[in-house]
Amino acid sequence: MKKKLLALAALGVVFALNTNAQTDDKDDNHTVEINIPEVAILDLEGKTAISLNVEAPTEAGKAVDFSKAKDSSIWLNYSSIVSKKENSRDVSVKISKNNVPDGMLLKVTAGADAGNGDGTMGKSTGTVTLNSKDQKVIDGIGSCYTGDGAKNGHNLSYSLELDPSKGSYADIDFDQDVTLTITYTISNK
């Protein structure tokens, strides 16, 4: 009887092992996790500082000349990965230290993307008159990269002009030599 019980127990163990064992068949699977980071970074390339110099007249009776108070030596580069729910980003600009001297306007225009990157590049919003409030200078940035360095991304063109809203040439404050800090920010819409 002991032999019979031992044989039945052994048969039960073999049967349990066979029912719990996995068998190979024509297909199998496993999981792969994909992680793509959110990216929103920008950089200014070219000169680290620019000077906008107004020329004095060489002839008595003439006004100062603002026509050469321009600079296009800085390039704005960015990299962006946006989720489908965020859609796009923009770049804003503001003066974050000091103010433009009275009677003058400081303007910046972002040129079209140079075309050396890939993805959905932003578009220039046109010329912006700078002040202490954030203003869009580039709009509609999707997942993209512009390329790194000068001649990549958007060329920034600065100009200094007389403020036509001032009533008189006497209202212009030429006593001020001012250093301004211009801040660019990339953010979600």
Image: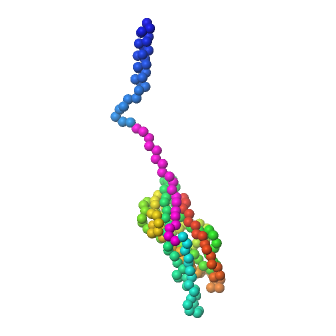
* Residue located at (58% from left, 72% from top): 130
The stretch in magenta equals 29-47
The image shows residue 35 at horizontal and vertical percentages of 48, 48
Residue 36 visible in the shown view: yes
Q: Residue 105: image x %, image y %?
A: 59, 77
Residue projecting furthest to the top? 1
User: Can you tell which quarter of the image residue 61 is in?
Assistant: bottom right
Q: Is residue 124 visible?
A: no
Whole-percent x, y for residue 109 in the image: 51, 72
Compared across the picture, whether 129 is left or right of 32 comes to: right
Quadrant housing residue 151: bottom left
Q: Is residue 45 magenta?
A: yes
**Where 3 falls versus 32 (above or below)?**
above
Q: Nearer the viewer, residue 93 or 12?
A: 12
Is residue 42 or residue 110 the one in the foreground? Answer: 42
Q: Is residue 55 above or below residue 138?
A: below
Residue 118 left/right relative to 182: left
Residue 49 rendering spot, x and y as whole percentages: 55, 72
Q: Residue at x 62, y 85 (%)?
A: 169
Query: Which residue ends up furthest to the front in the rendered image?
Result: 48
Which residue is more in the foreground, 41 or 124? 41
Question: Magenta stretch containing residue 135, yes or no?
Answer: no
What is the image's colouring? rainbow
Q: Residue at x 52, y 78 (%)?
A: 70
Determine whether 3 is above or below 62 in the image.
Answer: above
